[in-house]
Each structure stands twice: as C-alpha cells, then as structure tokens.
Amino acid sequence: MNVFIKLCALGFAGAYKLKMEIVDVKVPEGCNVIFGITHFIKSVEDIYEAIMNSVPGAKFGLAFAEASGPCLIRHEGTDETLRKLAAETLLKIGCGHTFMVFIKDMYPINVLNRLKEVPEVCTILAATANPLQIVIVESEQGRGVLGVIDGYKSKGIEGEDDIKKRKEFLRKIGYKL
C-alpha cells in the first residue's frame, strides 16, 4: 500500500511518499524467534557469544542487517538450517540494524537477559513461537520497522479454570515448582 504523509503540521516542508508492508515470519515447528534492533557489525559475533554462554550446545541461527557500507546480511549459528532461515528472513524484511535469531530446543527466556546485556542491542521487539508479522515502512532512503504483530488478537480475560491451566502448564514445562 502506498501512503502519502503530509508533515507540514509537524514543521516539515513537503510530502514524503512512504510504502508500508507486512512481512510474515515463518517460525518452524519446535522453534522460537527473537527479533530486535541493534547497531554495529560486531553484533553478530556478540549475539552468538551471548547465546552460547547462556545455553551451552544451543541450536540456533542468527542474522544481522547492516545499515551502511555494503548493507549485507551477516549471519552465524550452530544449526545451518536455522542460520539460512534467519538470513533469508532478514533479507526479506530488509531493514538495517535489525537482527533475528531462530532458536530450537530452548525458550527465549533462556537467552533474553544475556541478549539485553549485549552492548549493541538497542531493543528486542519480539520473542515468540507465535505467528509473527513485521510491519515495515519504506522511504526513498530505506526501510524501517514500525512494529510487530505477535500472535493473535485477545479473546477475553482469563477465568479461574484458565488460571489453573496456566499454573499447571508452567509446572509441566519446569518453570515453577
């Protein structure tokens, strides 16, 4: 969809032509995806080390999109299928200074705190196994992330039975006694 935005009210002269797009992220069965914003070429190595230091033997693939110079998708990982998927998905998103990690046989909760400590990581926008969509805007200069759509629309407020099921689930997967 093409969108014209008149920014005169904000003190800008002229109009900007923007294109909006939604990119679907396919999360493989048994995997989770982490998507965020980072700012430096060494992000790919530092994110790799953060994951490996959190979960020895971790199975993952990660990609980082440069925003200047050759503007390449840099990639690393321990699982070649997930590494390729991260690189191809991030190329489809096409927004500089973003990163994507597909993880297998672990949960985002196992690595998020370490990722947040990586000096280059600015923010994490999603950590999920749900269907994920990235909302993109494109100008003449490049592309940027407006936000993410993680999963589905809320259907209601949990009741007593739902609370019981939530607590049972957390104990079943080992996150509560």
Image: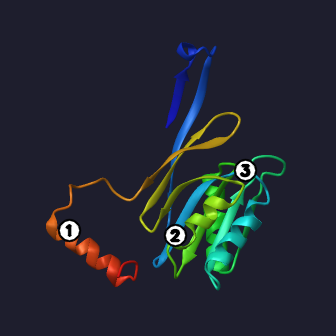
Query: Mark 1 = which residue?
Result: 162
Query: Camera-side residue: 100 or 138?
Result: 100
The numbered mark, 3 or 1, whose residue comes first in the sequence reads 3
Q: Distance between the residues labelled 2 and 1?
A: 23 Å
Tell me the tag on residue 108. Answer: 2
Res. 116 image quadrant: bottom right
Give yes or no for contact between labels 3 and 2 (Cβ–Cβ under 8 Å): no
In this picture, residue 75 sits left or right of residue 169? right
How far from the left and from the top, in percent, is residue 71?
Answer: 78, 51
Amino acid of disc 3: His
The numbered mark, 3 or 2, whose residue comes first in the sequence reads 3
Amino acid of disc 1: Asp
In terms of secondary structure, where does tag 1 sit?
helix
Amino acid of disc 2: Pro
Tell me the tag on residue 104. Answer: none
Give yes or no for contact between labels 3 and 1 (Cβ–Cβ under 8 Å): no
Q: Distance between the residues labelled 3 and 2?
A: 21 Å
